[in-house]
Each structure stands twice: as structure tokens, then as C-alpha cells.
């Protein structure tokens, strides 16, 4: 065995992992899970291993011991730093598809994933990372909840989940009948994230289909209950996962977050156009890090320029929802799991988020065209 002060051997290969998994037998089918073709999405990178075990949906609830046995066997291999094993439903002969979900804005005939009890879904997206999208998403969600709405938060950023930290939540979700996840809750908002399923700091190295499947399960196999609105913190960019979510989730509308400079706005435009191409209404654009106000002298500096998102919204024919300043208090409270909308609800920054949330809710209701339901009215003081 190598001395304790030496780094672990990172030469573990897919062949090593496959050999170990051949020792794990399916208790019902009488063979090992590799020979039976149950392993998919195997990825090994620098000692971090991820794979899926495909099972029949009806057997899923009782095969958690099989998943654990496979995960522990791989974890025992020299050079393995982390293991992520998931059960996925294998459906060689899909059941007849349900009727397509219809949108008030016209809708597509593509069949949507069903999310019982959730009246509206709003995606908070950005064309690129680093614009503070997740900070905006969590504060908007909390602002909606502060006005009496029933709110949920889905952290769809599989590879960089941040909502567990921002929402001040830890631990794994409980399940009902080993099938339905129960979201964690704080500040009156229900939350589910891939960050609850792996230790913080552990990289998630799933391939695209595995990540999309995990998101589908988090969205559709979660007991969200009765929600007025589900905020989806989207991954940055316009890749495969983002496109699948935009096409397959019955999204009521999308909100684009950008900073004021030209490069960020160029990427924001790409994100906006992606939603329009899949017929998801864009509710508007938010300008984050819009300006910096010196806490000592009050001088306002436009570090990343100013007004670019407002001008871009006008150019693209969508609404400008508001601007959020660049301020250390917003960053510190979000990183500390006590976002500014709940930690300093009467501050100017919290009022800015509440004003944006009011616009988002107003636009959501207009998109749904639901005049039959008397929803809570948001008032920003």
C-alpha cells in the first residue's frame, strides 16, 4: 500500500470498473449486470467514476441495494476518488404517450413531461456563466414566496449546482415508497438539486443522456405539491441539456439574465433566441451587476457599462424586467445561505428583487391567460 502522504493512483480505467461490476449479479435475472447489458454511461476521469444501471421501472424501488453494492465495489478499487451510480428506468417498449401538454401561447405538439400540481414553470437562464444567474434565480424565488405564493426551486444546473448552498440546505431528499422524492424546504420554498445527491465538491461527470434523465426524474418524480410557480435555475449556455429542458418541460416562460457588457449581451441574445425557436415565451431580460454604488461615498460606477440589457430588450422586442447592482452584500448573503431578500427584506437590493419578481409574476399570469384563478397579488412596498 502506498504511504499515506502519496497521492492516490489515478490510473483506474473503464476496464477495471467493468471487471468489478461483472461481480455484481442481478438477483432476479440470474446474471451479472455487465453481461445483462444493464450498465450505461460509464465514465472515468482522473479517479472519478460515474455510471447508470438500467432497470425495468417496476423493479426500480427494490434495486437500491444492487446500486449500493455496485457503487461500493467500484469505490474499493485503488485510485478511485469518488463514485456516482444511479438507477435509470429502461423502457424498451414505451407505453402510449399521453396527450401533448398545451401552452396558453399556442404550444407545440411535442409531448411534454407532466408535473402535477405545478401551475406555472419559469426558467431563469443565461447565455453564459458568471453573470449571477443563480443568485438572481434564488432571490426572485424568495421574493415570490414573500408575497404569499407557493414556490418551488429546481436547480437544473447538473454540473454546477449552487442552490443547496444559496438556500442553506444540506442532506439527501427523503423518498416516498422509494419512488417519489420529497424536496427539501427553507424560507418557505421547496428545493431540489443534484447537489443534494452527491457530496459538495464532488464533480458530476454524467454524459448528456444521463444528466437529462436525472433532470427528468427530479422534475417529474418529485412531490412538489400545490405550487403557484416553479423557478428552474437553468444551466448556462444553449447546449443539449438546455434544449431538452426547453423542448420537453411545459415551460410557461423564460427570463434571461445578463450583465451590461457587449459580450454578455451577445450570449444572452443566443439564449433568448433558443427559447423563441422552441416556442417558449421570453418574459424579459434582467440586467445583473448593473452598477456599483460605493458604500462609503455613494459614488456610482458602471464597471460593466450600463443600460445594455435595457437596450437589448428593446432591440429584441421583449420586456426589460429591472436591474440589480453589483454589491458585496448580495454576494455574501447568497454564498452564506441567507439571501438578501430574506436576510435584509427592507433593503434597497431586496426591493429591487421584489420589483422584478412582481413583473415576472405579472408576465407569467398574462402568458397563462388564467383569468379564472384568483392568484395572490404581489405588492412591492
Image (cartoon, rainbow, N blue to C red):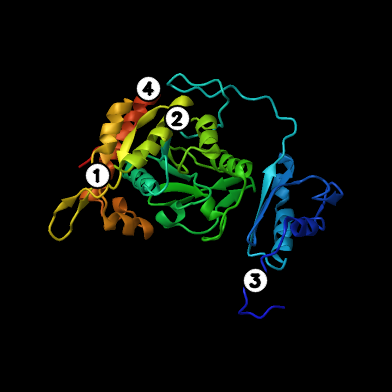
Where does label 1 land, which residue? 305
Residue mark closest to the camera, 3 vs 2: 3
Measured Cα–Cα span from mark 4 to mark 2: 19 Å
Identify the residue at horizontal 46%, vertical 41% (top origin). Answer: 237
Check the image and report above or below for 29 versus 123.
below
Marks 4 and 1, the one that precedes in the sequence: 1
Where does label 2 land, which residue? 275
Q: Residues within 10 Å of mark 2 (few under 14, many from 20)?
A: many
The mark found on residue 110 in the picture is none
SS at circle 2: helix
Identify the residue at horizontal 76%, vertical 60% (top origin). Answer: 16
Front residue of 234/302: it is 302
> Is residue 257 in view from this perspective?
yes
The mark found on residue 8 in the picture is 3
Marks 3 and 2, the one that precedes in the sequence: 3
Measured Cα–Cα span from mark 4 to mark 1: 37 Å
Where does label 4 land, which residue? 369
Residue mark closest to the camera, 4 vs 3: 3
Check the image and report above or below for 17 versus 139.
below
- Asked if the residue at tag 2 contacts the one at tag 3, i.e. Cβ–Cβ closer than 8 Å, the answer is no
Amino acid at each position: 500500500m502506498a504511504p499515506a502522504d502519496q497521492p492516490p493512483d489515478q490510473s483506474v480505467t473503464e476496464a477495471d470498473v467493468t471487471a468489478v461490476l461483472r461481480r455484481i449479479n442481478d438477483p432476479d435475472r440470474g446474471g451479472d449486470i455487465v453481461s445483462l447489458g444493464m450498465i450505461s454511461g460509464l465514465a472515468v476521469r482522473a479517479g472519478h467514476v460515474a455510471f447508470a444501471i438500467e432497470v425495468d421501472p417496476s423493479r426500480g424501488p427494490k434495486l437500491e441495494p444492487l446500486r449500493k453494492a455496485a457503487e461500493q465495489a467500484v469505490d474499493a478499487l485503488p485510485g478511485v476518488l469518488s463514485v456516482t451510480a444511479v438507477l435509470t428506468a429502461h423502457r424498451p417498449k414505451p407505453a402510449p404517450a399521453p396527450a401533448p401538454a398545451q401552452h396558453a401561447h399556442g404550444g407545440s405538439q411535442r409531448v411534454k413531461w407532466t408535473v402535477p400540481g405545478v401551475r406555472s414553470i419559469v426558467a431563469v437562464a443565461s447565455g453564459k456563466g458568471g453573470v449571477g444567474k443563480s443568485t438572481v434565480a434564488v432571490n426572485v424565488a424568495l421574493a415570490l414566496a414573500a408575497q404569499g405564493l407557493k414556490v418551488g426551486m429546481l436547480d437544473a444546473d447538473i454540473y454546477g449546482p449552487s442552490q443547496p448552498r444559496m438556500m442553506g440546505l444540506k442532506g439527501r431528499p427523503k423518498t416516498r415508497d422509494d419512488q417519489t422524492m420529497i424536496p427539501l424546504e427553507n424560507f418557505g420554498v421547496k428545493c431540489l438539486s443534484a447537489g443534494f445527491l452527491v457530496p459538495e465538491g464532488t464533480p458530476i461527470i454524467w454524459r448528456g443522456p444521463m444528466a437529462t434523465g436525472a433532470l427528468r426524474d427530479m422534475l417529474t418524480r418529485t412531490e412538489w405539491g400545490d405550487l403557484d410557480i416553479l423557478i428552474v435555475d437553468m444551466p448556462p449556455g444553449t447546449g443539449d441539456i438546455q434544449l431538452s429542458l426547453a423542448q420537453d418541460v411545459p415551460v410557461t416562460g423564460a427570463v434571461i439574465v445578463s450583465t451590461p457588457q457587449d459580450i454578455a449581451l451577445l450570449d444572452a441574445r443566443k439564449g433568448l433566441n433558443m427559447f423563441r425557436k422552441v416556442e417558449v415565451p421570453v418574459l424579459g431580460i434582467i440586467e445583473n451587476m448593473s452598477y456599483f454604488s460605493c458604500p462609503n461615498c455613494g459614488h456610482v460606477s458602471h464597471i460593466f457599462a450600463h443600460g445594455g440589457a435595457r437596450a437589448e430588450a428593446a432591440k429584441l422586442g421583449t420586456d426589460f424586467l429591472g436591474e440589480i447592482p453589483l454589491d458585496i452584500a448580495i454576494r455574501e448573503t447568497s454564498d452564506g445561505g441567507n439571501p438578501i431578500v430574506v436576510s435584509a427584506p427592507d433593503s434597497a437590493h431586496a426591493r429591487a428583487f421584489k420589483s422584478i419578481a412582481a413583473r415576472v409574476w405579472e408576465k407569467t399570469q398574462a402568458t397563462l391567460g388564467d383569468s379564472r384563478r384568483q392568484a395572490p397579488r404581489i405588492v412591492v412596498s
